[in-house]
Image (cartoon, helix red, strand yellow):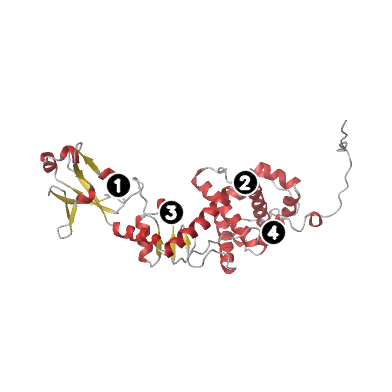
Amino acid sequence: MAKYMEHKRDTELFVAGSLEGLLPEDSVARAIWAGLEHLDFGPYDGLYKNDAVGRSALNPRCLTAVWTLALLRGVTSSIRLAALCGQDLEFRWLLGDAPVEKSTLCDFRKKHGEALASLSTQVLGALGRNGLLPEENMGVDGTIVRAASITAHGAYHDTLQLDAIEKKGIQCFVPEDRTANRMAPGVSPEYHTVCRGLTNHADKFSYDESTDAMHCPHGHCMDWRKLNDGKTAAVYQAPAEVCQSCRAKPQCCPKSQSGRYVNRSLYKEKIETIAQRLETLEGRRQKNARWVVCEGTFARLNNLLHWGRCRIWGRAGAEVELLWRQFVHNLMLLSGTWKPMVPAKTG
């Protein structure tokens, strides 16, 4: 019969030494602290009013450190984190073995978004100075400032934003979004009706610049009525009596009682020009860079930082949670624990 070693869980242990001596030199807690040591936590100082009276507060640098380590471990509960701060060596070392309540941890994570944003800006600046950003003059989904070019997914673009950015001399590399609910007004399939052999595509309606009017395929004039809600297209409409007497009404606008209308996109040419840039060598390089830098970072946020769901309610809470994970991600890059995602060169 096989023999096994006996359990000796009643063995008395005598652990001697300080937290500093017991913590391994390659602990991630040391890397976190090294990254935080050079940041200015001044924005937090104004949040405490205990200069003359009151007990000493926990150092915000320590609280930031324990939340950073917690997110790396997938801990998002203040209750669980408070327990770890009293039991786990790495958390105890980061706090200097100071006691902490779950309410203190919870409030610190939720209430100091502006101060955390200041820290995040400092980390981003340090990454730039150390050459750890993907490229000095490239904006990926608008996240890198002072960009000479911006690359984004088609579903993220806003027509007026693209126009404003282009006017500032910043090149955009954005594919045309071909989903019906996001295409430029007057282009989506709701205006492309083919019935009984009669084609009533929106592009069959001609525009007369001299009179600022549209003409339908049957020669009827459609006058300018208004701009659409997004201010990106002009709306033209035919008189109701003209449409009611037109032989093509059953195929063109069978349910309309006020006359057929059509939208003329004011930015169609600009959107097409921006989309065509992606077919160039530079466009392919930018698209590859966006995929590696942006989507790769999102994967880290979801997997390595365990962002399964938000713990804080509302949009503001989601923004704070994203800011925390963005800060932790960039701090790990700055400390050298993680490697930056650098797009491969395309030629």
Q: Which is more N-terminal, label 3 or label 4?
A: 4
The residue type indicated by label 4 comes to Ala
Residue 168 position within the rendered picture, expressed as x and y whole percent measured from the top left: 38, 66
The residue type indicated by label 2 comes to Cys
Which one is in front in this view, the residue at disc 1 or the one at disc 4?
1
From mark 1 to mark 2, how far is it between C-alphas?
47 Å
Which one is in front in this view, the residue at disc 2 or the one at disc 3?
3
Asked where in the image residue 157 lies, by quadrant, the reply is bottom left
**Residue where numbered disc 3 is placed:** 153
- In the image shown, does 3 or 277 lie closer to the viewer? 3
| Badge number at residue 188 | 1
The residue type indicated by label 3 comes to His
Report the side of 96 relative to 153 (left or right).
Answer: right
Q: Secondary structure at mark 3?
A: loop
Q: Which is more N-terminal, label 4 or label 1?
A: 4
Which residue occupies 70% across, 55% down?
28
**Residue where numbered disc 2 is placed:** 106
Marks 2 and 3: CB-CB under 8 Å? no
Quadrant in which the N terminus is drawn: top right
| Badge number at residue 69 | none
From mark 3 to mark 1, how far is it between C-alphas?
19 Å
Marks 4 and 3: CB-CB under 8 Å? no
Q: Secondary structure at mark 2?
A: helix
Report the side of 222 relative to 142 (left or right).
Answer: left
- In the image shown, does 270 or 203 lie closer to the viewer? 203
Residue 49 position within the rendered picture, expressed as x and y whole percent measured from the top left: 63, 56
Asked where in the image residue 121 lies, by quadrant, the reply is bottom right
